[in-house]
Image (cartoon, helix red, strand yellow):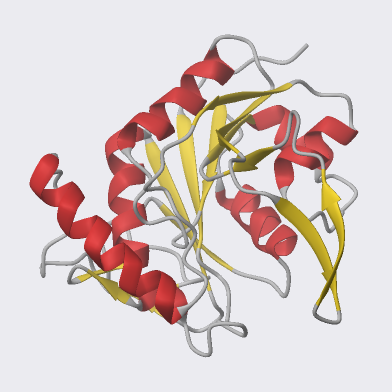
Amino acid sequence: MGTSDGPVWAVVLAGGRGARFGRLKQFEPLGGVRLVDRTVATARRTCDRVALVLPDGVEWDGPAVDALAVGGDHQSESMRAALAVVPDDAGVIVATDPAHPLAPDRVYTDVVAAVRAGADGAVPVLPLLEVIQRVVDGRVVETLPKADAVVTQAPHAFRADALRAVHADRPRPVENSGLLVEHGYRVVAVEGHPANLHVATEADLTVMEHLAHAMALADPVPLPDETHGARRTAGVPTPT
């Protein structure tokens, strides 16, 4: 059995090209702060180090990060690019993304704590409360059972050696927690958060503007200001 000893590295997967959104979604503002900046800031507060994956050729002018990588044509390729720049002594890797910009610090620390306590991976979940149905050509064809079903959010935390092991043969999974389960690893669930929504559309951004405002009033947290880190390009080493 492996170990989770060692630093906690956050991997911010921001290498998408925005094919579904229509532009680079990770750089859209939310409450005056870009989605990716919010995610990096939360990762900074809750993890020891941060690796950021960006689209090829995109310069980074946001909060300071510890490593940069170039994203691939699939999230699995972007994850492997990040793993290549995360040092071997990392104990826990937290996989997150700018599509979940309002994930609270507590969710990050909870998934890390679950891995530190012995799990191979941990994901935040919420119960499914609505009816779930299959629709084909506009017609309802089946109502699906929802016993034991949950909505899984981000971030996810993994033992670093387990995550590296399941990516050794370069698979292309939908997401990483299921990949670990397929390989026999133990992934546990922690409590998610209702405001930790997934930004997929312009309408989602509008809803989350209201949430971000309400959360800032209820529980202010530090956010990046206009003073960003040195401009860097993914794939170009930091000068020493």
User: What's the residue at 82%, 52% (across, down)?
Assistant: 143
Q: Which residue sits at x=34%, y=51%?
A: 102
Q: In the rendered image, which quarter is residue 231 located in?
A: bottom left
* Quadrant position of residue 32: bottom left
Left or right placement of residue 36 versus residue 166 in this view: left
**Rendered location of residue 114, percent (x, y):** 54, 17
Q: Using the image, determine if residue 172 lies above or below residue 195.
A: below
158 or 202: which is nearer to us?
202
Q: Name the quadrant of the C terminus.
A: bottom left
Position of residue 188 measured from the top left corner of the image (x, y, whole percent): 66, 22
Q: Position of residue 17 (x, y in %)?
A: 57, 82
Where does the image place residue 166, in percent across and percent down from the top left? Answer: 82, 39
Q: Is residue 58 visible?
A: yes
**Number of marks drawn:** 0
Please name the residue shown 25% across and 67% down the image: 209
**191 versus 129 height, above or below:** above
Q: Is residue 94 above or below residue 110?
A: below
The N terminus, quarter of image = top right
Q: Is residue 232 visible?
A: no
x 56%, y 9%: residue: 117
Q: Which residue appears farthest toward the bottom when viewing the image?
A: 22
- Splitting the image into 4 quarters, where does residue 145 fall? top right
